[in-house]
Image (spheres, rainbow, N blue to C red):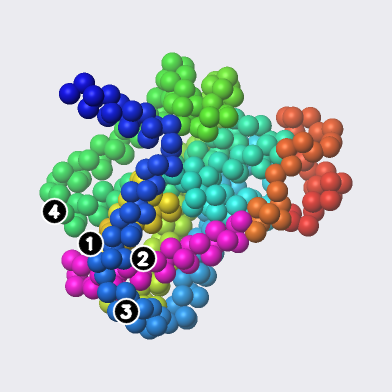
Amino acid sequence: MRSFVNTLKSGVRWVLTNRWSLRIIGISVFAIILVKVDLGEALRVLTTLDPRFLIVSLALQACALVVATFRWQLIMRRLAIRIPFVRSLIYSLIGTAAALITPGQLGEFVKVLYLRDLRAPVPESVLSVLIDRAYDLLLLLLFGYIAIAVLFGVPPIVTIVIMAGGGILLAAGYFFARKREETARWLAAALARISPQAYQETVQRDTQHLIQSLGALSPGFLLICGFLSVGNYALLLLRIYAVALALHIAVPFWYFAMVMPLMRLVGLIPISISGIGTRDITIIYLLAQVGIPQEASLVFSVVGLLALQFQALIGLLAWWRYPLQLKKKGTLPPDRLPTETDLVSTGERGIS
């Protein structure tokens, strides 16, 4: 028994010290799926792909990126970070590319490094990305719970109570954090814990300043960002539905609206790479409930992921074209962002 416990402890220690070890689970699941399905039938489904709908999917994906970038730029402006929209778009593209290859999409925080490259204050930069990501995550959790309630029969009264309680808690937390110093300190500490390790001390050190910046965001402004988030979500939903239409998968749109949040939530679990395996098994199971063959579901999942990787490829090219330059020559003070004149003097006007 003692040897078994020691072996178990060693295994847990190995998993914790080898953060990529759990990714094997998703890859293993995907390998099992490939063994179980009829690959010949899957290839036949792939040959029926209509490229016109695939182009529509990519266009909707680009529109979603623009909307998400506009929201992030609004947040940055409220935090006194002002950069040209095209530059923000490039950083967003790089961030989404990095997010696809990192657990929990933490690669989005690469945008903080680019903002620091522009001499933006790190606390506000981290906060801008945190708020931006929080909108997407909260919306995903909301629609994910609705999907679970609809597909798995959660009683409507329970759903209403939970949603109402969550909304009240969010509103109370926001106003409480604005008015109570001790709550402000706790919230800043929480932000520090979920920030990248390189920035935790910085965020913790500037606790009060961060909370003051957060408190300056009015309810009206947060509501505007919420509407933009809903628009971004709708575009992403239409994007994945266009992929289904490209493969002639006949599923009601409302059902796809239930499938997508669950698919994305499962893809966030850090046991795979870009959700490979976990997303596929989820899609196969959910679409099987409405009579879609597993081969068609697998092709739909893979094509959807490849379409997303097309954006990641562009992001990686942008990363190569505009690499981080954290040790630029210049005399700008750390509390001032570069102006258009500064950008011209450093030869960077081309992307602004």
Asked if the stretch drawn in magenta spans residue 297, the answer is yes
Do the residues under discs 2 and 4 have CB atoms within 8 angstroms?
no
Which of the two discs, 2 and 4, labels the residue nearer the N terminus? 4
Left or right, 320 with respect to 24, comes to right
* Residue stretch rendered in magenta on the structure: 287-316
The three-letter amino acid code for the residue at tag 1 is: Tyr
User: Gap in Å between the C-alphas at discs 2 and 4?
Assistant: 25 Å
* Residue at position x 58%, y 29% in the image: 198
Q: Quadrant of the C terminus?
A: bottom right
Tell me whether the residue at label 1 lies in contact with that at label 2, contact meaning CB atoms closer than 8 angstroms. Answer: no
Q: Would residue 333 be visible to someone looking at this image?
A: yes
Res 285 label: 1
Residue drawn at point x = 83 percent, y = 43 percent: 342
Q: Give amino acid for label 2.
A: Ser
**Mark in front: 4 vs 1:** 1
Give the alpha-carbon distance from disc 4 to disc 3, as whole Å: 36 Å
In the image, which disc is placed on residue 40? Answer: 3
Secondary structure under tag 2 reads: helix
Q: Are marks 4 and 3 in contact (CB under 8 Å)?
A: no
Q: Is residue 199 above or below residue 74?
A: above
Q: Please name the residue that numbered disc 2 is placed on.
A: 301
What main secondary structure does the magenta stretch of the protein show?
helix
Q: Amino acid at mark 4?
A: Gly
| Residue 10, position as x, y percentages in the image | 33, 28
Q: Eyeballing the image, is 185 above or below 119?
A: above
Q: Of callouts 4 and 1, which one flags the residue occurring earlier in the amino acid sequence? A: 4
